[in-house]
Amino acid sequence: MASRDGHYREKTGAVGRVDGVEEMDGNGNGNGNESGNENDGERTVEEMREEKTGFLAYIKTRDFWILLVAGQVLALCLTATNTFTTFLANEGTSIPAFQSLFNYILLSLIYLSYTLYRYGAKGYASFQLKWGWKYILLSFCDVEGNYFTVLAYRYTTILSATLINFWAIVIVVVISFLFLKVRYHWTQMLGILICIGGLGILLASDHITGANQYTVDAGDQLKGDLFALLGATFYGLANVFEEFMLSERPLYEVVGQLGQWGTVINGVQAAIFDRGSFRTAVWNAAVGGYLTGYTLALSLFYSTGPLIFRMGSAAFFNISLLTTNFWGVVVGVEVFQLSIHFMYPIAFVCIILGQVAYFLGRKVFGDAFKPWLGKNQEKGVSGVGTAKRRAERPGVVV
């Protein structure tokens, strides 16, 4: 079979590149180079890690500041999805599974289409036989994280629901330590604790002022908090799994598979559990606008997240999202008539300082160096945001 831009060659079954594009072999294996560019650097990852040392080595790099800003973009995206979910609930439209379905469809249209273009039909089928089950598991955790988080908004407050980030951090740290051989530096643990301290300041200000509280039935509040906790557990598992997959597979493939299997799983779940809610939901122009805003914000979230999983880690991904509480209140002042206490800006600064502290004492690659990929990241893909790419192409931005 002739290759389409060299994406797949059935007869040879060999891995190679044509015009700088990754090919697939007969078993669905890639060549480990997402961008397809030949190495233009002479140093190995291990050599580069030893070049710059010192307590502020990573803080002084461009990568750190890109990571810090990207984290706040994610927090703003999450704030937007939380706000649109609250709008929908206020309109009388609460359809947790169906609400997220459009996001997975949009991701499929963008990333799955490109994956099919790159791999070709036979290469894609071969890849599915080897990797498909892993993506089904990843998508299941992700879908359930979205489902239970959205479901929580039926019963609890926006501030209470956003506290799911705290439990997700615990899940991420424990799973990464046990299964990915991640060993956290003491400054990383300190940074996480400072971030949690910032979240504590935010909660303390609410308690002191008695502000930003909705009237919620005690039974519903407990139910909503349990749903939020379950959603956080699935999110934590999905985050670690996605970081692992992104370290070994091309970005467009991972996000495309999330879209594909997320659409299937989410669609089935919506058909089973959301039928009653769908019939009683309010449908008007406002609801259509809120669903559109929710979908666009969540798709941007899914498109930006992989950069943090590669340049940073699942742990940093989650502590970045802790500022969502601050941004949520900023929005809530105008939209939900919430009040803002002077301690909120202090909490925000504390969380940002915690994110800086997280990378103190780290070497030049920071969390982009994944211990499970080997000293020179030889088991990983060379793609946007990876340490392997930085070693091969020192001049690239990400």
Image (cartoon, rainbow, N blue to C red):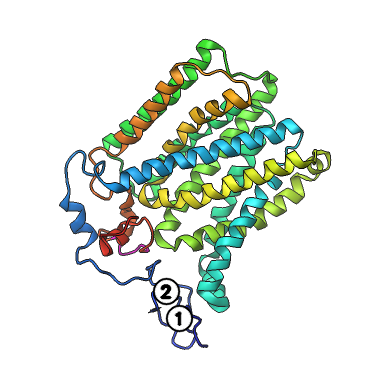
**Magenta residues (range):** 377-381
Q: In front: 289, or 191?
A: 289
State left or right for residue 210 relative to residue 183: right
Q: Is residue 151 visible?
A: yes
Q: Which mark is residue 199?
A: none
Residue at the image position 49 percent from the left and 62 percent from the top: 252
Count neighbours of disc 1 (C-alpha within 10 A) and say few if under 14, some if 14 to 19, many if 20 or more: some
Q: Is residue 271 left or right of residue 230?
A: right
Q: Amino acid at mark 2?
A: Val
Mark 2 burial class by Cα count in 10 Å: few <14, some 14-19, many 20+: some
For disc 1, the marked residue is 6
Find residue 119 and report its horizontal and vertical position in percent: 51, 74
Q: CA distance from mark 1 to mark 2?
A: 7 Å
Mark sitting earlier along the chain (1/2): 1
Magenta region includes residue 300: no
Compare residues 291 and 154 and report the one nearer the observer.
Answer: 291
Q: Are discs 1 and 2 less than 8 Å apart at CB? A: yes
Q: Which mark is residue 21?
A: 2
- Residue found 68% across the figure and 40% down from its top: 290
Q: Is residue 71 left or right of residue 223?
A: left
Residue 291, position as x, y percentages in the image: 68, 44
Please state the horizontal and vertical placement of residue 350, each as a whole percent of the image.
Answer: 37, 26
What is the three-letter code of the residue carrying label 1? Answer: Gly
Q: Is residue 318 visible?
A: no
